[in-house]
Amino acid sequence: MKRSNTIGLLFVVLGIVIGTIFQFFKSDADEIAHLSQTMQQALQVKQLDTQLNEHALKAASFRLVHFDHIVQTVRQLSEVRLSLQQSVQQLPSQLTQRFTKLEAVIDQRIDQLERLKAKVALARNSSNFLLKYLSMNVDKQSSEIALKSLQAMTELQAFQLFPNRQRLKATQDILHELNDTLDREHVFQIVVHHLQRSFELTQDISALLNNVLANESNEVIDEFISHLYAVQTQRQNLSNGYRYILFGVAVLIFIALAYMIVRWTKERHRAQEAAQLFEDAVDSMSEGFAFFGPNQKLVFWNSTFARLHDPLENRLYKGMSWQEFEDTQKEVGFLLQSELQKDGSTLDLTLDGNWMLSANTHMHQGGYAVVRVDLTEQKRAQDQLQLAATVFQTASEAMMVTDKDDIIQMVNPAFSKITGYLEREVLGQSPTLLSSGHHNAAYYKKMYLDLLNTGTWQGEIWNRRKSGEIYPEWLSISTIYDDDGEVLQRVSLFTDITSRKKSEERIHYQANYDSLTDLPNRNLFKERLNHAINMARRSKDRVALLFLDLDNFKHINDTLGHLLGDELLRQVAERLRSLFRESDTIARLSGDEFVIIINEANYDPDLQHLLARLLECVSLPYVLDGNTAYTSASVGATFFPDDAQSSENLLKNADAAMFKAKEMGRNTYSFFTPEMNSRAQERHTLEVALHKALDKKHFLLHYQPIVDPHTQTVVSTEALVRWNDPEKGLITPEKFIPAAEDTGLIVPMGEWILRQACADAAHWQQEEGLNIGVSVNLSSRQFMRSDIYGLVKDVLKESQLPANKLTLEITESLLVEDENEILKTLRKLRDLGVLLSIDDFGTGYSSLSYLKRFPITTLKIDRSFICDILSDSEDAALTQAILSMAKSMNLKVVAEGVENAGQAEYLKERQCDLIQGFYYSKPLALEDLLLSFKQKKLSA
């Protein structure tokens, strides 16, 4: 007990020492932080003092238009000095005395600067008066006097900017000469007077500047900082000493405490070993055992008792009273059920689902010996037998038990539900009464052999109901053996899998057929193409593969909507079915792309005739919900084994031939040639290069000015992307944008264009002072595949570009994609303040209802209308109509593609708001654009 008290006392002392160390560290840290703050303030005073020198030099050389910088620096110096004064008051007195000296020096500098400002202001005012007076009177006097006066003024200004003895002497000589020349009544006598006064002020300014620069403030500040650093170092060394002493004391106490704990632990361990021997013996019992002493307090309990009372384990403790033990069981609801036995014990069901036999024996000397026997397994086995019987009767799977001779002994209700036979109708019968005749004798023989060899069999089998209906079922048979290994019984479980078979057929169809056209999809197409190639290889026949792509299908989708576009695809599929044989395969790959596999295509004239019929059939008009639509097809054809040996290469060749048909003007067909393969490879190379260019940032932006023709000023620009390839140089967008659209790269590329354009526009607004905006094109794919509102909002926030300086250019086709969603997004963008423009207006699905419903701010007339506006009356009329309509709807109009003065003047006369084109400027790199403004080639 004494040793325990000693250990406790050592813990208290150690805690006091640790607390003292912590408090000392905190106080020391506060003091060092205060010294560091004072040092920062002193350094700030030194920096401001240096700035005053710079301002004094600029003021004395008349390079300051006003004295705001001096006033601001003096105010900052006063504020920092006040903060430093408060900090110094908490430091030693020698620092206070040095700070007083520093304050006096600073006050002296401020006074000198005020006098310098006054002199400079007088000199500048005098010079301004002289310039004005000379400009008004120089023509009224003789040229010699005026020339001398101007020369004197020039020398004086040169002396003010760059004072030296030569300019001083030159200025004095000119002034003496003017004094000798002029009489007192001469009109230029006042000029001489002001020149002499300015000359004197300039000399005073030079003297004051020398005094300011010669001020000893910098030395006084450095001296103050040096003493402050010395105090800081002294405090640091002192605190380190105290720290080491306290650490030493703590270590000694910790060593003593460790020694005492080791001794106490050894003695306690020896005492516990004896008690542990008894507890181990009790703990090894399979029964739960606990002992409550004569005082009704819990002395110990074994692991089995703890396991059986698991819900109470955290609440069992030595010294727990018997009454508290019973109250705790009731509180947690430990006993769910209790049955009194004849011997006085009880059969209890506990909270954790265990069954146990409980006996509480009262000891002669007082207390209780508590015994608990786990009967859970016995009870569980009994319950399982009851459960098995219940499962057999209620299971949804059919169960049938036969003896060793395969005579039915037992069936459950599910058996009757599936087969239609009642139990009494099948008992004593052979399972063969269910046979459907669907399987041959060999099938049943293999089943029987598997049962003999392994004792089990499972698989799909077709059986017959009582009604005569044949149905599929999944059957599992297990054999039960006796102790000698002889067959005792067989248990059969089966389920009706009719619904599953139908689901599998439906899944197979969905996996292999296009849901829109009911044609084979890409998966089934590949399988059939490989099969056709293998068959042709064996029979030495040819296989033709046709790749068909509908022309202008996107335009139909954009104008009539996706629902009617889908209907068009269904009608195309029906027409294709009517042209080809059952042995041929027509498949839809994706979108408006179809492929046809033609077996035994050995006669070219027949195939050419078929292709002509195909083009004619597809180009016939389509009636779509009361609308008449027209389309055509571009078809590429290739052959196995002439052009390729694998299905992949055949498909690639047919695709290349189809693109060739597109280039030939569409609504035609083209046979594959080896040259097409190289062109397809070039396109693939372009797509790979585009990915690398985006990763390596090879793209850059050019900007084409958008000009107000009435003021001839640039009000905005259009951002146009260029590809700066390291090998090929600058590549224009028409060569790579289509590939970017096809591959989906237009989405990350468009995001980069938006970010870069906004960053550049913010730069020329904030850094160059150019109040002009920027227009950025958004593709439909970019708009639909990304959160364009969130992107624009983030980009505007990052770049700090005003929202009304950003115009997003969209196409007319976007407005018919998903009208409600597009409208929501466009309205959110307008709420941000962003302007919205329809690009190439008049070339797509131009609808006045869209202009009315959507929050559009600008229409952009396509260059195709502007090109012949002076010679083509229809283009002129369309342009005039667009301008009139836009004016009536309060929309701005931008005419792009203006290339000559005649077009510009024509549009200006008809009140076109903005003009864009080579007439004003070609697209320029950012640095060239800014240079054009600096060289006045463009004005903002």
Image (cartoon, grey):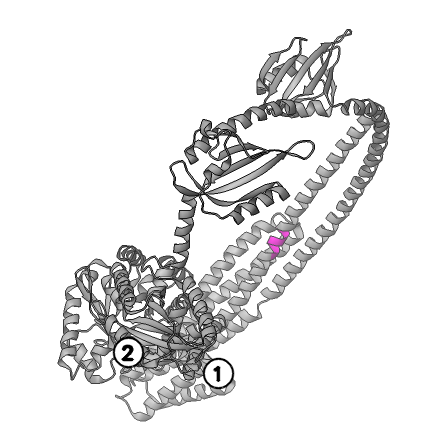
Q: CA distance from mark 1 to mark 2?
A: 47 Å
**Disc 1 or disc 2, which is closer to the eye?**
2
Above or below 12: residue 849 = below
| Image spot of residue 472 (x, y percent) | 44, 44
- Identify the residue position indicated by label 1 in the image: 727
Along the line of sight, the residue nearer the viewer: 249 or 201: 249
| Image spot of residue 873 (x, y percent) | 13, 80
**Which amino acid type corresponds to the residue marked 2 in the rendered image?**
His
**Which amino acid type corresponds to the residue marked 1 in the rendered image?**
Glu
Report whether 407 appears left or right of 245.
Answer: left
Prevalent SS, magenta region: helix
Dot 1 surroundings within 10 Å: few (below 14), some, or many (20 or more)?
A: few
Dot 2 surroundings within 10 Å: few (below 14), some, or many (20 or more)?
A: few
Above or below 246: residue 899 = below
Q: Which one is earlier in the sequence, the residue at label 1 or at label 2?
A: 2
Question: Magenta region: which residues?
Answer: 34-39
* Element type at mark 1: loop
The residue located at (68%, 26%) in the rendering is 307
Question: Is residue 38 one of those drawn in magenta?
Answer: yes
Above or below 566: residue 251 = above
Report whether 162 appears left or right of 149.
Answer: right
Report whether 714 appears left or right of 396.
Answer: left
- Identify the residue position indicated by label 2 in the image: 609
* Element type at mark 2: helix
| Image spot of residue 938 (x, y percent) | 31, 79
